[in-house]
Amino acid sequence: MMPMYFEDFAVGQEFTTPARTVTEADVVSFAAWTGDYNPLHTDAEFARTTRFGERLAHGLLGTSLCLGLMARTGIFEGSAVALLGIDGWRFRAPILIGTTVHCLVTVLGCRPTSRGDTGVVQRRFTLLDQDGTTLQEGRMDVLVAIRSPRSP
């Protein structure tokens, strides 16, 4: 898909990303990159004694996957200028190793900036598993280029 620009977005638009299965390698790699070796993520014996009964992915791994899955759609590739923030993010259910996830992304609002060459697209991300259970959700607003900015 070609990138979409600010003027291509409308409130209520929804996009569904491709799916991806979370692997043990993902969890191990995320632990190494972040330094978060919490035994809930890295120690199978410890994790068996928890309420989950097995290791689970780091919460922020799920949040990061949302952005990666969105990138696979191509919608913001080349038109996104900056991620503006992550707001009201909630972790609703654990992401276990072997869970297949995808995102539903909903446009909540659009407003041009005063510069005239970009606009803010307010987006709600919902990370879902293969059964449709919501795992994580929240807002990630993005600054997006305007295809034909007005002249100064």
Image: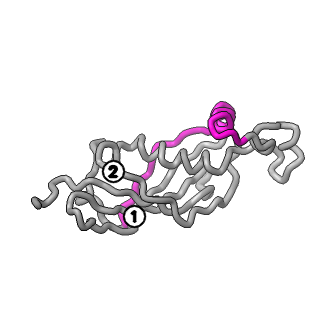
Residue position for label 2: 81
Q: Residue 83's x, y, as percent?
A: 42, 54
How many numbered discs?
Answer: 2
Magenta-tinted stretch: 12-36
Question: Compared to 61, does 132 lie above or below?
Answer: below
Q: Residue 11's x, y, as percent?
A: 34, 68
Are the residues at dot 2 and dot 1 in contact (C-beta closer than 8 Å)? no
Residue in view at x 55 percent, y 39 percent: 20
Indicate yes or no whether the magenta region holds residue 25: yes
Residue in view at x 42 percent, y 58 percent: 84
Q: Residue furthest top?
A: 25
Indicate yes or no whether the magenta region holds residue 16: yes
Task: Tell me the kind of residue under disc 1.
Answer: Gln
Position of the N terminus by quadrant = top left
Q: State how far apart marks 2 and 1 are (Cα).
A: 14 Å
Residue 79 lies left or right of residue 87; in this view the side is: left
> How busy is the neighbourhood of tag 1: few (under 14 within 10 Å), some, or many (20 plus)?
some
Q: Residue 5's x, y, as percent?
A: 26, 53
Disc 2 on helix, strand or loop? strand
Residue in view at x 65 percent, y 51 percent: 59
Residue 10 found in image quarter: bottom left
Q: Residue 17's x, y, as percent?
A: 45, 47
In the image, which is nearer the foreground, mark 2 or mark 1? 2
Is residue 130 visible in this depiction of the protein? no
Specify the label residue 18 is tagged with: none
Disc 1 on helix, strand or loop? strand
Specify the label residue 122 is tagged with: 1
- N-term mark: 2 or 1: 2
